Amino acid sequence: MEYQFSQRVTSLKPSAIREILKNSSAPGVIPLSAGNPAPDAFPAEDIRAISQQLLTDTPMEALQYSVTEGYPPLRQHVKEYMANKHHVGSDFDEILITSGAQQVMDLLTKTMLNEGDTVLCESPSFIGSLNTFRSYQARLVGVEMEPDGISIQGLQQALETQKNIKYLYTIPNFQNPSGITMSLEKRKKVYELCRDHNVLILEDNPYGDLRFAGEDLPSIKSFDEAGIVVYAGSFSKVISPGMRVGFVIGPQPVVQKMVVCKQGEDVHSNIWAQIVCHRFMTQRDYEAHLNRLRCIYRRKSTVLLEAMEAHFAPLITWNTFQGGLFAWCTLPDSIDMLEFVRRGSQRKACVVPGTAFLTDEAQPCSCFRINFSTPSDQQLEEGIQILGELAREMSAGK
Amino acid sequence: MEYQFSQRVTSLKPSAIREILKNSSAPGVIPLSAGNPAPDAFPAEDIRAISQQLLTDTPMEALQYSVTEGYPPLRQHVKEYMANKHHVGSDFDEILITSGAQQVMDLLTKTMLNEGDTVLCESPSFIGSLNTFRSYQARLVGVEMEPDGISIQGLQQALETQKNIKYLYTIPNFQNPSGITMSLEKRKKVYELCRDHNVLILEDNPYGDLRFAGEDLPSIKSFDEAGIVVYAGSFSKVISPGMRVGFVIGPQPVVQKMVVCKQGEDVHSNIWAQIVCHRFMTQRDYEAHLNRLRCIYRRKSTVLLEAMEAHFAPLITWNTFQGGLFAWCTLPDSIDMLEFVRRGSQRKACVVPGTAFLTDEAQPCSCFRINFSTPSDQQLEEGIQILGELAREMSAGK
C-alpha cells in the first residue's frame, strides 16, 4: 500500500538529538551530545523506598486509572511550592501534571496554533520544542540571542512585523543550547512587550533549580498580572527523566483546553511516578536534595571548564554559564563546523552541531553544544582533549 | 487577555466519561459508569516485587532517559509474543511502545489525517477514541453495528460514497460500548473491503485477553498481507492502567512517522512501567495470570447477568457479550434515556448515556452502558435493582 501521510508529518524529520542519543550509548563513545542528568544526581534510594511503601500499603493508588489533571496532592503541593518559593501562579492560573515538560509544548501548541501561525523563539533554541511546534505546522521565527538573553530590539521588531504570532517560546535560565541566562531587565521588558502585543509567553524552565553560580532571578511568570504567561516545569532534571513527570501553570482557560487535549493523548500521566514525586517533595528534604544537585553540577562544570581552558582556548571559545547542563562553543571561521562534528564523532567524541538548534537548519553556524552532565569526569577530559586536538589540526588545514 | 484558541480545540468538549469518572468516586456512588479493571485483577504483589528488585539492582535503567521507540526488550518480547500467539505482525511491520493505547489513536491520527479527512467508525464506538479523532478535525462517519459486528453493507456503502477516508476504526472483541464481537466471516470481509479501497484499518484490541465465553477469533491484523492494518494493544486491562503502557504494531513507514510524532509529544513513555511489564510477562506465568483475570470477569459478569435477569427483564434488554468489561442495555421507547440516566445518577446509580458513544450526540438513542468490572458484587446488585425500579416507575409514567 502507498501511504498518504498528513501534511503536518510529511516534512518532519526525527530529532537529531534523539538520533544521536541512540548511538551515544555505543561502546567507547564519549556522550558529550546527550542531555541526561548525571548518574549520581538521582535520588534512587529514596525513590526505591517510597515506591516500596506505596506498592505495599496502597498499590491501587499507583496502579488504577486516575484523572487527567494529575494526582491531586501533587497538583496542590506544586501549586503551593511554586507560589511560595517562586511567585509562580495566581488566582487566575491552573495547574496540570503532564508527561514531561515536552507534553506542555505539545498541548499548548495543539491548543493555540492553527496551521501557519507564528511562534517566536530564541535562536538558537531547544530542538525538541522546535520540532513539536513544527509538527503543528507552526511558522518559526527566530530572534537573536545576546549574552544577557533574547535581543529586545529583535523581539520588538518581530512583534511589530510578523503576523499571527501565537506565543514567544523562551528558556530564561541556562538556555538549551546556549547556556545563556536572561537578565532581570530583559525579563521585565519581554513580559511588557508581549503583553502590549497580546502575545502569550511560553516560559520553559527545566534547569532553573540547577543554578551553581550567581543569584536566582525571578521568572517571567512571576510578573504575570495579565494572564499571558504559560509556565512549563519538569521533574526530569531534579528527580528522574525516566518517570516523565512535568507540569504547566497557566491561565485557567488555556490550561482547561490543554486538559481536554491531554485526555485524547494519553488519558493521564503514569500515576506511580506522580505519587513518587509528591512524596519525594513532601517526605524528604527537597531543598537539601536540590543543593546536592547544584554541588554535583558545579563540580562537573568545573571539570569541563578546566579541560576547555587547557584544550580549547584560544581557538574554540564558549559562553559563560551559571547553571544547567550545557556549554555552547564557537569554532573559528576557518573550521567547518559540520565537518568538525563529523570528524569528532569518528574519534568517539560526540557533540551536537549548532545548526540543529536553529529555526532554519540551512543557516550558517559555527557553534556546537557540549553536555557535561552525562559523561564521567574522565570522559569529559578525554573528549575535550580529542576535540581540541581536532580543532588545531583542522585549523592548520589538515 | 482574550485567548484565541486553535480551530481544532474550539469545538471540543471534555469526554463525558472522564467527567463522570471524576464524580463516580464521590461517597456512596455506585460506579457503573467507569471502565476500571477490578481491584482484585491487579498483580500488585508481583509488580511490587519486580519494582523493588529493579530499583535495587539497576535503578538507572528505570530512572534515566530512554529511547522513543520503547524499552528494547519489551518491544522484542511483545513482537514475538504477538506473532507467536496471535499471528499479529509481519516482516513489514514495526512495533512502538506508547503511553497507553489512547496514544496510538492520537499518533496515528496525527500521522495520517488532514483537517476534514474522514474516519469511519462503528456506531456506537469508544468515546475516548472518537474525541481524539475529533481533536484533529476528523469528519467522523458512523457505520451501524449488528449483533455480529459492523454492518458490511453499511461499510461497503461508506467506502464507496465517502471522500478522503483515511482509516476504519474498529474494536472487534467485546466492543466498547456495545459488547459486540465481530464474527470471523465479517473480519475477513472488513479486511478485504478496506484493502480493495486502499483504506487503513485501526484495530483496537484492549479487551481481547478478557474473553470468558466462546472461542478466540483471529484478529483482523492476522490476515494483513497488504500492510493496511495498524493494531493497537494495551496493558491497561491486563496489568495496570495507571502505568500507561500500550503498543502499536503496524506497517513500518506508518509507525516510523508515529515515532517522530511521539518524540514531540512525550519523548518516551515512563520507563519503569515498561520494564515492569516486560519482567511481568517474562518472569511470571503470564498465561496463568490471564486465566485468573478471565475467571474474575466471568464471575462478575454472572453477577451482573443474574441481577439484570431479576431486575431489568423484560423491560430493559441487553446485548450478549463474551468478554470485556461492559454491558450495553436498551430501554423501551416509552422511557427517555437521558432522563433515565439523570434520575439514576440522582439515586447514586451512575451509567453512561448511549449518546456519548455516537458520532453525533444529537442522534436519538435509547441505550446506556454498564460497567461490571469496577463495582463490587454488592454494588452491582444494588445498582441494577435501583435502575430496574427506576425503569418500571418511568414506564408506568411516574
Image (cartoon, coloured by chain):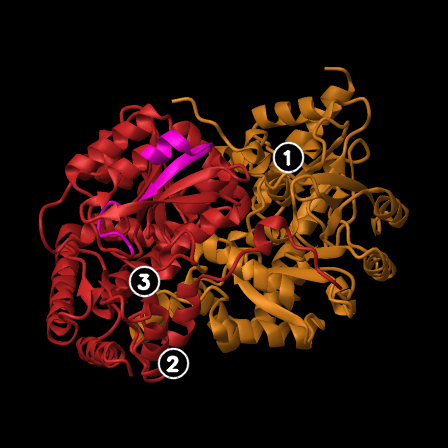
Chain colours: A red, B orange
Q: Earlier in the sequence, mark 3 or mark 2?
A: 2
A317 vs B378: above or below: below
Toward the right, the furthest residue is B153
B381 vs A398: above or below: above
Figure quadrant of residue A295: bottom left
Q: In the rendered image, which residue does mark 2 sit on? A: A26
Q: Nearer the viewer, residue B150 or A36?
A: A36
Instruction: Give the amino acid at mark 1.
Output: Val
Q: Nearer the viewer, residue B176 or B383?
A: B176
> Residue at 61% of width from left, 77% of height from top?
B80
In-image side of B182 versus A140 (left or right): right
Instruction: Give the amino acid at mark 3.
Output: Gln
Marks 1 and 2 belong to one chain: no
Query: How far from the left and from the top, in percent, is residue A322?
Result: 14, 54
Does residue B301 appear anywhere in the picture?
yes
In-image side of B277 versus A333 (left or right): right
Calculate the distance from the C-alpha at mark 1 to the C-alpha at mark 2.
Answer: 52 Å
Task: Specify start and end residues of the magenta stretch as a single range.
Answer: A157-176
Query: Would residue A323 be counted in the magenta stretch?
Result: no
Q: In the rendered image, which residue does mark 3 sit on? A: A52
Does residue A61 appear anywhere in the picture?
no
B154 vs A392: above or below: above
Q: Are marks 1 and 2 in contact (CB under 8 Å)?
A: no
Q: In the rendered image, which residue does mark 1 sit on? A: B352
Marks 3 and 2 belong to one chain: yes
Sort mark 3 into few (<14), some (14-19) or many (20+) by Cα contacts within 10 Å: some
- Image mark 1: chain: B
Helix, strand or loop at disc 2? loop
> Residue at 78% of width from left, 67% of height from top?
B226
> Residue at 75% of width from left, 69% of height from top?
B222
